[in-house]
Amino acid sequence: MRAPGGVTGAPLLSLRGVRKSFGTGAALNVVLDGVDLDVEQGSCVVVVGSSGSGKSTLLRVVDLLEDVDDGQVLLDGEDVADPWVDADAVRARLAMVFQQYNLFPHLRVLDNVTLAPRVVHGRRRAEAEDAAMAVLERVGLADVARAYPDQLSGGQQQRAAIARALVNGPELLLLDEVTSALDPELVGEVLDLLLSLRADGVAGGPTTMLVATHEMGFAREVADEVVFLHAGRVHERGTPGQVLDDPQRERTRDFLRRLR
């Protein structure tokens, strides 16, 4: 059964006419070409599209890892793409999980999860470890909290990366192809965790998510809205049933046919 829908109202996140390119002159590569997108509080928006369509850049723009060339990135109505905005304060409200786990190999799982709360947010070690253990329990890793990353499976490492993202209670969780580096038999455990987080969060209530993925089954189950991105533009959007079962645009149909 699909996770419950999001809360209606003013969007937590809005993108308006966002453009991003790399290179210059003949080598100019327009990656995002006027993207409009909304994510309401408590909802999940899943972005699908071929490799190179701009999905990862879109998430990096939201997390302020890339500057925009034009347009607005509105978080609770504030344009956080404005160069005068405190980027660190914005990132404290967001969390991003990447394709690669990016865990520090010389630190135990618990230390990986508590690093940002202690170093960036100034939380006392005991307080940070209590919060980390609660999140590790939530993602099913409490029993390996004192193990090192290379002692874990790929699925466990990705779940540890998700725990690290959740420990500070982000308002918006950004997920970039988080199963693409996993062996096929490990994909299910991560997707099951995300589906559970979508419904119940960490401390109750759904987690607001913006997800880039190739996993159409997951998109069908978890998304309130599916956005098909092609060549940096939104070509189609709607409910999972509308976009995945009855696409109206030929490019969307071509993309889904290739996946099947």
Image: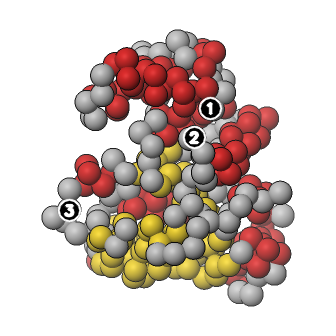
Q: Is residue 208 left or right of residue 65?
A: right
User: Which quadrant is the C terminus positioned in?
Assistant: bottom right
> Which residue appears at 20% of the width and 56% of the height?
86
Label located before the other in sequence (3 or 1): 3
Q: Which residue is mark 1?
A: 138
Amino acid at pointer 1 = Arg
The answer to whether one can see residue 5 in this image is yes
Name the residue: 47% across, 79% down. 36
Secondary structure type for disc 3: loop
Q: Where 7 sits versus 156, above or below?
A: below
Q: Are marks 2 and 1 in contact (CB under 8 Å)?
A: yes
Which amino acid, mark 3? Val
Determine contact: label 3, label 1, CB under 8 Å. no
29, 260: nearer the viewer = 260
Quick one: label 3, few (<14), some, or many (20+) residues within 10 Å?
Answer: few
Query: How far apart are the two marked residues, 2 and 3, measured between alpha carbons?
Result: 29 Å
Query: Quick check: 158 left or right of 102?
Result: right
> CA gap, disc 2 to disc 1?
7 Å
Q: Could you say where residue 247 lies in the image, as x and y percent from the top left?
A: 76, 82
